Amino acid sequence: MRLRSAPIGVILAGGPGLRIGGDKAIVELHGEPLIGYPLNAVQEVLGKVAIAAKSGTKLPPLSSVMVWIEPERPSHPLVGITQALALAGGRPVLVCAGDLPFVTPGLIQRLVRADPGRAPVVVASAGGRMHPLLGCYRARALQLLAGPARTGTASLHETIASIGPVLVEADDPEELFDVDTPDDLLLATAMLDRRRASAAASDQPNVKS
């Protein structure tokens, strides 16, 4: 992939986070900022990564990451996507919601490498349901999404479905688990505990009696 056409990774963090009490990016999961989990996954794949956020969004200390400020109004996920496309200089943009703690570099890589054909976007899916906040958007998606982004009233899923996305099915549906509420955070903590316990058990040497 030529450098000038390599996607820029963009973590979407412009949402108000009302259901979790605000400032979702600095909510901690196992002592780490929630946004750090998807950020690390994207950084393993792409050399240039930015965070799209409102001017007043509280973010944890971050190194080697640009912050792209999106318009204050309307408050809609399409605003972050279109602002990222506008600032990307014609390069594709791999967008990833900042509340996906279990997304993996492997899925990011598959989205980046997928052949879009004539489609303007490649989007992750699980069980046939697409997840528009994890996808690789081509430059021409900007002109298709700019209108709905300005009004801020269109359904995100219906809008992305209308432009004919290519879907990439996640190997593990948990990769697309998003943390929206305190209950989601508790569930994510339990999921992470389970994953770490499983990994620790698999690292134990087999002891023969």
Image (cartoon, helix red, strand yellow):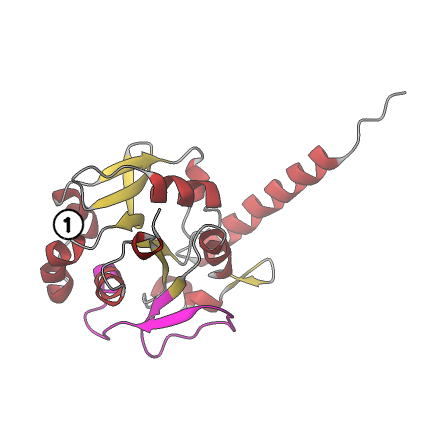
Q: Taking 58 as reference, is 95 above or below it? A: above
Residue under the point 51% across and 48% down: 187
Q: Residue furthest top?
A: 209
Check disc 1 and report its element: helix, strand or loop.
Answer: helix
Image-quadrant location for residue 32: bottom right
91 vs 125, nearest the viewer: 91
Residue under the point 32% across and 38% down: 114
Q: Residue furthest front?
A: 2
Q: Taking 18 as reference, is 188 above or below it? A: above
**Which stretch did the figure color magenta?**
51-80
Q: Is residue 200 left or right of residue 117?
A: right
Residue under the point 12% across and 66% down: 150
**Category of crowding for the residue at label 1, using alpha-carbon neighbours closer than 10 angstroms: few (below 14), some (14–19), many (at least 20):** some
198 vs 111, nearest the viewer: 111
Mark 1, residue position: 159
Q: What is the number of callouts on the image?
A: 1
Looking at the rendered structure, the kind of residue marked 1 is Thr
Q: Residue furthest bottom?
A: 56
Q: Is residue 53 magenta?
A: yes
- Residue 122, percent across and down? 27, 43
Q: Is residue 59 left or right of residue 124?
A: right
- Residue 135, percent across and down? 31, 48
On the rendered image, what quadrant is the C terminus found in? top right
Residue under the point 52% across and 73% down: 61
- Residue 112, percent across and down? 35, 45
**Magenta-drawn stretch, dominant element (helix, strand or loop):** loop
Can residue 70 be seen in the rendering of this structure? yes
- Residue 161, percent across and down? 17, 43
94 vs 29, nearest the viewer: 94
